[in-house]
Image: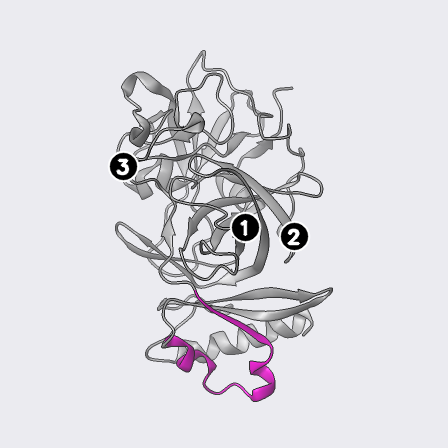
Amino acid sequence: MLPDSARDLKARLSRRLTGAPTAVASSLDGATRWSGVALGLAPVGPGQVHLAIRLIEQADADVVLAGLSAAAREEVDVRVIGQVRPSTSPTGHSPAELQQRVRPLRPGLSVSHPDVTAGTLGGFVRRPGTDGLLVLSNNHVLADSGAASEGDPVLQPGVADGGTPGDRIGTLTAFVRLGADPGNLVDAAVAALSPGVQCDPSGYPGGALLAEVAAPDEVDPDELVEKVGRTTGHTRGRITAVEVDGVGVQYDDGVHTFDDQVEIEGLTGAFSAGGDSGSVIWRSRDRAPLGLLFAGSTEGGTAGGGVTFANPLATVLRELGVEWVSSAG
């Protein structure tokens, strides 16, 4: 079906699920309680999409599909992806190049708050009108899912990779809090670099990314994308759904639900794994940055390894009030 038709079906199904006792998605017309159903757009051909339906358990499909006509059912892409979790690292993860202490700093390195295991340094940003650079990653990596305070230290490498107070690279400056109600947009935080800490904003595989961030409406299904992250390194994938609402992510303090997310799967196996949270995702064809990786599942990917979810990077920058920095110049 055409994207606009899919959006209409998505809105109608979302409204219907709002009244269901066992499966409720986050509505386009207002946030509702999350219970494991996410809705988005999945590509099937040039200018054609299916409605993407993502579920925790197969039993939920009966509730979600009930009431849809036979024709409508032919226009949906249903996948059971299991529970989605933020992609921080478990303790005791074996070290690799990106998990070691590296100076100058560059994207893809292990980084964390002192009370977090490890995530990924995604890239560098700055506040308009200022000169100092800020490290960009997730709230759950740099701000301990909101339990931290501005002024707390940030370490490279992260704690799971042997980071100690002596590895401090900066100070937590700002983060977007995770709301208890559905409708979160980003899991994001920034830290100001300490005096004397050098960095290379262009240090991605293949060189610098574009200075211009892809707008949310320029993030298209079926695009080939890449990222560099602390655990799986440089990987390539494909956008399998956009405008995904109702993505419930299991954090330590409970489930937080996100709208307008991007879904990605690896071309051969997993696109990401625990510890890759905070990675910046870019478009392969023109190297335009487009997303901030924050969560994933271990099921549901057609190439194996589950699916990955990312916040649109333009939304992240807007919510934090910062600008993208592509090079040291």
Q: Is 134 situated above or below 62?
A: above
- Nearer to us in this view, 11 or 38: 38
Q: Position of residue 33 (x, y in %)?
A: 35, 68
Mark 2 or 1, which is nearer the eye?
1
Q: Position of residue 92 (x, y in %)?
A: 27, 34
Mark 1 or 3, which is nearer the eye?
1
Label 2: how many Cα within 10 Å (few below 14, some 14–19, many 20+): some
Tell me how far mark 1 sits from mark 3, CA to CA. Answer: 26 Å
Q: Which residues are magenta?
A: 60-80
- Nearer to us in this view, 14 or 228: 228
- Quadrant containing the C terminus is top right
Q: Is 215 situated above or below 257?
A: above
Mark before the other along the chain sequence, 1 or 3: 3
- Residue appearing at x 38%, y 76% in the figure: 60
Q: Residue furthest right?
A: 46
Label 3: how many Cα within 10 Å (few below 14, some 14–19, many 20+): some
Three-letter code, disc 3? Thr
Instruction: Determine if the magenta segment contains residue 74.
Output: yes
